[in-house]
Image: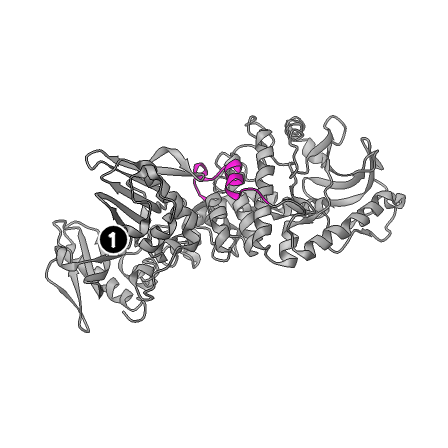
């Protein structure tokens, strides 16, 4: 990036600052490089004159800029001066020497795990400072994060939203921000809160850790739809970072951690220089002398078209962020309304463009991890040497009696106490309770007759209600149930997997149904992703379809006469009095005197059970070929 020379029309001073050159310009204004009386560099932002003609713009902008001066901290580049009463209003922010995160990832690749953890801690502290000042950043993205010698810096409070001033410059419902790093609330035009910045932080960290935005697609409209309704793709994020990033990406703002909670989760970071990769550190070191030269060169303000002054191979701090930001912002503001219309229409159009409910599983990396986990081995591993004495349970989980439940969860017993852990289970039967666990809302349902409690956390975003549930009976120690969930969450990235490679426990029920079978049997589908848990997938169409897996003793289930599927295969209709429902159970194989079963359930028109069984049979035949080899 270069400092462009000034022209005949450019000012030589703005306020008390000597103007050195032009850093960038765009639809909202331009950014100039300036030097104060003490020689310190600042980035001076001037607003375009035509914006000042808009009614109330100057007053609103002044209130917001004044509020932004309250932000100060080790991980921000705060506003240090401004003048809103002059002919051309301006503000000056600290000029930070560093490399934009966007450029660092583009040129050097994903950051290593220690660097991402340091980045997360620094950005969380910066957001804490911003939120304490009554502001929401609203446009946190890699281009607005600078990697400096001693840590990250957050820049650009020019479009920050004042929480205490709903009538501020950026009104509630506006879409200002960068599409791929928006929160679901922003894409839907809903009120913006501090939790919106935490969602953006999750996207920034995922991008830094993997080099890929977790929601980005080839279409801006579809990207916005994915943010609002889809699931984050964290498959390329290192496993040890997913527990840090995934909670930030909850669709429900109330379920995202606060900056303080994220800081506590990360723990104390190592002291000393920031752990950036060597190429980034060298680039930062090279920039200092170059910028000093620019500040001390009186010729930098000469009128004319001489060769622009370069400040190094990796672009500098505010130069890159401001110049590229203003250029992109102009385009973004021009198309903001169009993009929001596209978002509103995405439910009708986007899924039909190749990623519709017929073809898309909503299961993300977290759900895959829960599905593949050997639940009993995981439970014993998670609780090793961590069973509270007051729980009443044997402190050595290895002595507990354990068995696999019909959902491939784990039933553990110690004395007369019983614990059922179900990874990937639904939380739909639970109510939110006034408590949180690691920044996530707890759900619960107490059963006074059974003298036990039911606790869980929701890990799925949006309408998805899957998570981890714990059912504790014969003991009203709900604190222990919460402790079990906490330990499982802390160890889920290292959970042991099922050793049986062809077990139905490992399959995604959404993926075993061929898409053509859905079109031919229960279409047209609703324009929304299927609802899913680790063991079931539910589609809505002209009738509803649910495909699931279970581990059961078929002889204990009431079934009607067998239905011949051909080629020696047999399905069993589950007995029911409902004329609108048919559910077929197909035993795939026998494991330890129980059967691994695929179930296909159709719920449709009253009195059409026979027709529904024919539909279920067609779907069952289509999916059998999708089961793991060996079944």
436 with respect to 10 (left or right): left
* Residue 173 in sight in this render: no
Q: Which residue is drawn at 18% across and 71% down?
A: 566
State which region is magenta.
Answer: 250-269
Q: Which residue is drawn at 68% across and 56% down?
A: 278
Q: Dot 1, how many residues are within 10 Å of its Cα: few (below 14), some (14-19), or many (20+)?
A: some
268 with respect to 601 (left or right): right
Residue 412 spot, x, y in % from top left:
27, 49
SS class of the residue under badge 1?
loop
Residue 457 spot, x, y in % from top left:
37, 42
Furthest-bottom residue in view?
A: 567
Tell me if residue 257 is in the magenta stretch: yes
Residue 302 spot, x, y in % from top left:
89, 45
Placement of the C terminus among the 4 image quadrants: bottom left
Q: Which residue is drawn at 38% across and 59% down?
A: 359
444 with respect to 606 (left or right): right
What residue is disc 1 on?
405
């Amino acid at each position: 990036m270069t400092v462009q020379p000034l022209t005949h029309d450019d000012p030589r001073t703005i306020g008390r600052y000597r103007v050195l050159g032009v850093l960038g310009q765009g639809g909202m204004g331009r950014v100039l490089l300036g030097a104060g009386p003490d020689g310190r560099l600042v980035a001076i932002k001037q607003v375009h004159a035509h914006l000042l003609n808009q009614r109330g713009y100057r007053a609103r902008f002044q209130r917001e800029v004044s509020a932004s001066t309250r932000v100060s901290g080790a991980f921000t580049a705060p506003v240090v001066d401004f003048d809103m009463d002059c002919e051309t209003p301006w503000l000056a922010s600290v000029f930070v020497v560093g490399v934009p995160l966007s450029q660092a990832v583009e040129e050097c690749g994903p950051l290593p795990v220690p660097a991402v953890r340091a980045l997360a801690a620094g950005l969380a502290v910066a957001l804490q400072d911003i939120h304490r000042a009554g502001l929401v950043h609203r446009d946190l993205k890699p281009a607005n994060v600078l990697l400096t010698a001693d840590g990250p810096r957050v820049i650009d409070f020019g479009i920050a939203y004042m929480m205490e001033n709903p009538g501020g410059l950026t009104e509630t419902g506006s879409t200002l921000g960068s599409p791929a790093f928006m929160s679901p609330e922003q894409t839907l035009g809903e009120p913006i809160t501090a939790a919106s910045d935490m969602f953006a932080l999750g996207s920034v960290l995922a991008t830094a850790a993997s080099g890929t935005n977790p929601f980005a697609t080839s279409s801006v409209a579809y990207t916005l739809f994915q943010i609002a309704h889809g699931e984050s793709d964290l498959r390329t994020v290192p496993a040890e970072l997913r527990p840090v990033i995934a909670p930030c990406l909850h669709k429900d703002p109330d379920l995202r951690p606060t900056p303080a909670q994220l800081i506590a989760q990360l723990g104390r970071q190592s002291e000393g220089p920031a752990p950036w990769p060597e190429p980034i550190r060298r680039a930062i070191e090279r920039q200092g002398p170059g910028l000093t030269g620019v500040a001390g060169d009186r010729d930098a303000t000469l009128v004319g078209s001489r060769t622009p002054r370069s400040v190094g191979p990796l672009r500098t701090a505010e130069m890159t962020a401001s110049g590229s930001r203003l250029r992109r912002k102009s385009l973004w503001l021009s198309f903001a309304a169009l993009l929001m219309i596209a978002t509103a229409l995405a439910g009708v159009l986007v899924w039909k463009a190749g990623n519709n409910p017929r073809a898309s599983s909503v299961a993300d990396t977290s759900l895959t991890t829960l599905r593949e986990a050997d639940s009993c081995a995981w439970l014993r591993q998670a609780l090793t040497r961590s069973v509270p004495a007051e729980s009443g349970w044997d402190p050595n989980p290895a002595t507990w009696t354990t068995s696999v439940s019909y959902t491939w969860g784990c039933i553990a017993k110690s004395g007369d106490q019983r614990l059922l852990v179900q990874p990937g289970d639904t939380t739909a039967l639970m109510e939110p309770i006034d408590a949180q666990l690691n920044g996530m809302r707890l759900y619960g349902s107490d059963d006074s007759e059974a003298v036990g409690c039911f606790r869980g956390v929701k890990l799925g975003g949006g309408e998805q209600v899957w998570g981890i549930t714990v059912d504790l009976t014969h003991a009203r120690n709900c604190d222990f149930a919460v402790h079990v969930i906490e330990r499982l969450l802390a160890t889920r990235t290292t959970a042991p997997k099922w050793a049986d490679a062809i077990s139905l426990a490992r399959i995604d029920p959404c993926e075993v149904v061929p898409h053509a079978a859905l079109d031919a049997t229960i279409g047209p589908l609703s324009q929304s992703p299927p609802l899913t848990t680790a063991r079931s997938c539910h589609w809505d169409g002209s009738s509803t379809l649910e495909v699931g897996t279970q581990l059961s003793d078929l002889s204990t289930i009431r079934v009607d006469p067998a239905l011949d599927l051909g080629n020696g295969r047999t399905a069993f209709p589950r007995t029911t009095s409902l004329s609108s429902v048919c559910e077929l159970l197909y035993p795939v194989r026998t494991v330890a005197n129980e059967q691994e079963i695929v179930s296909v359930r159709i719920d449709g028109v009253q009195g059409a059970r026979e027709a529904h069984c024919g539909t279920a049979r067609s779907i069952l035949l289509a999916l059998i070929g999708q089961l793991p080899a060996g079944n």
